[in-house]
Amino acid sequence: MKLLSRLIRPALGYASLLSIGLSGQCFAQTAPVHTIPARTIPTPTTVSPELQKVIARTCRLPSSPPPRTNEEWEASIHASDAEGDKSFDQLQKKFHVTVEEGKLGGVTIYDVKPDVIPEEKRRRVLMHVHGGAYVYGGGKNAASEGMILAHYGEIEVIAVDYRMPPKFPFPAALDDSVAVWKELIKTHTPRNIGIFGTSAGGGLTLAIVIKLKELGLPLPGAIMAGTPWADLSKTGDTYVTNEFVDNVLCTSNGLLEAAAKLYAGTHDLKEPLLSPIYGDLSGFPPTVLLSGTRDQFLSNTVRVHQKLLQSGVEVELLVFEGESHAQYAADVPESAIAYKEVAEFFDRHLDR
Amino acid sequence: MKLLSRLIRPALGYASLLSIGLSGQCFAQTAPVHTIPARTIPTPTTVSPELQKVIARTCRLPSSPPPRTNEEWEASIHASDAEGDKSFDQLQKKFHVTVEEGKLGGVTIYDVKPDVIPEEKRRRVLMHVHGGAYVYGGGKNAASEGMILAHYGEIEVIAVDYRMPPKFPFPAALDDSVAVWKELIKTHTPRNIGIFGTSAGGGLTLAIVIKLKELGLPLPGAIMAGTPWADLSKTGDTYVTNEFVDNVLCTSNGLLEAAAKLYAGTHDLKEPLLSPIYGDLSGFPPTVLLSGTRDQFLSNTVRVHQKLLQSGVEVELLVFEGESHAQYAADVPESAIAYKEVAEFFDRHLDR
């Protein structure tokens, strides 16, 4: 009997749910928090050597608090933009695209064209809204992700360089995007147009569709919301479970929290046009969502996925092994796989 | 200048990837492991109160090492089965199903029927293979998950009580499943039949299809592989990132590792029929995969997802907020959502 009771314990630790015994009565304790011991996590061997190098980079926390004044924000933005500028030419060369600055609906845009556009895709266009926590990533860097998808999708991309804080908080980004949309639907059938973005750009993509519904404007034929910042209030499980595991965001406290507040201004962070997870997502066009197993925004992504499914929307979820926030856009072989899957998604769903 | 350099740092910690600057040169250090500090993670507020209670249960590690002898395994299995038996009647009542034990192809099966089967589903059947690390979950508990899907899918389920270690290691489980399949296709059109399972049952579902391909037998019309144990060798990122975060498996060392070895016997853990992630997944029927953000098998799930996508298979991925391994089968409102989505998947893909 002593042997038996010694052996019952290991089994009870697992068996109930493993065998779908369901009731889970084997777990005795209930606690408001889990305590996770300190630990080291190795780089996974299940991704390409190039991605392994990216995953192996350690989380580096800022050495100073986030900017507090408009001047400090502008200096921070300037420094970030300068960093992004360095890789711009390299990206353009790598992806064989031309990038032309212009205006559409009074808004600065970058018209990104791949070298060759197949006949069947010439009536299509993708509108892109960049990431960067609604603060960073403006100027010509607004065209970065557009270059990737223009290349893999063999399609023209109009990247919106929307106005941002500290001068132009919410809803300037949304207003600018809608202004560009109104122009695009003058020259293109709406169902020939896709909208896409990553991180803040993913959240903004969702917010744009909610706004278009509110305005009674035609909706795009399909959208991609990559690891969308769908909840600016830091609500969601992986904000905590993947804290420090995600080597891009590291934590959503500090800078990210400050950026959310700067963008929201006097508005509540949970307003649907700021945090689209709280919006009405019914009637959305087919949507593809991307995230990674280490992504702090994995919960943002899967919550949007479930809400879209339950709203009857056609939606696909892609979650990439070992990747932190937006790392599907890193310069690794997995990036080509991700954007080709997105390109095929738009191919299947946009009209010609 | 001093101000500027102070402000550059916070921006560089995030801006590159957030703004899809891509090159990631902002991260200076590369290390083979990440060190994650000890921390407490709260229960998410983004799930139902019932699921919050399930998530709040703390990870309870076994107080003793895994069984070492056949006698110790059998005692452990007996104790686990007895625990599962307690909830059997309750499940049957809750899901309004009849369960009848029988034989098919010489294998013990449980024929699970919902009270009402709509006319259009009467020619269909789902074959189920249970979870339990290829060791636990046999006997009448083999019918547990079948009861859930029989109910939500309004469809007959044949649950296979396949032989297991310590007496019957690999490939007994697979052989028994194939034997049942051969009988089922005598009375049903193969494309009217689905196969499904969770955990070990999810891995076995994938292995069955690989085996049917090898044997040149007809394939099912669709399958569900829930959080599949697709890699028995503990290879995959969330085996480590979600260690102790997952309150069902807690860790894949100890009991789970011992069960894998017991099942594999003299075979290599990476043989495709044991770890189907290493198999040829081309030509698979439409597949739905389930996991959770805290699941230790999230990597198993997303690796299978990507491999199926890249093999040209129609596949859907569902990842549930805050859930640990197989917790979509827990007695919570989210369970109804999950199994209804699976039922709709089979509805869309099975012939009539």
Image: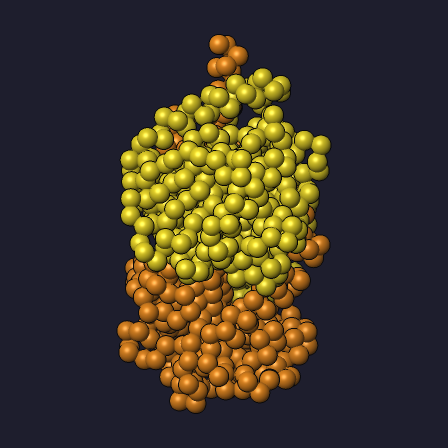
Chain colours: A orange, B yellow
Q: Which residue is drawn at 33% across and 75% down?
A: A212
Left or right placement of residue B279 versus residue A312 in this view: right
Q: Residue at x 31, y 54 (%)?
A: B118
Q: Foreground: B260 or A248?
A: B260
Rendering coords of residue A260 (x, y %)? 40, 59
- Dividing the picture into quadrants, the one containing residue A337 is bottom right
Rendering coords of residue B173 (x, y %)? 58, 37
Left or right placement of residue A55 versus residue A287 in this view: right
Q: Residue furthest front?
A: B186
In what quadrant of the picture does the C terminus of chain B appear? bottom left
Q: Visible in this render: residue A107? A: no
Q: Residue at x 60, y 84 (%)?
A: A117
- Dividing the picture into quadrants, the one containing residue B95 is top left
- Dividing the picture into quadrants, the one containing residue B91 is top left
Q: Foreground: A340 or B244?
A: A340
Q: Residue furthest bottom?
A: A187
Q: Residue at x 50, y 10 (%)?
A: A2
Left or right placement of residue A141 versus residue B349 in this view: right
Q: Foreground: B244 or B91?
A: B91
Rendering coords of residue B272 (x, y %)? 66, 46
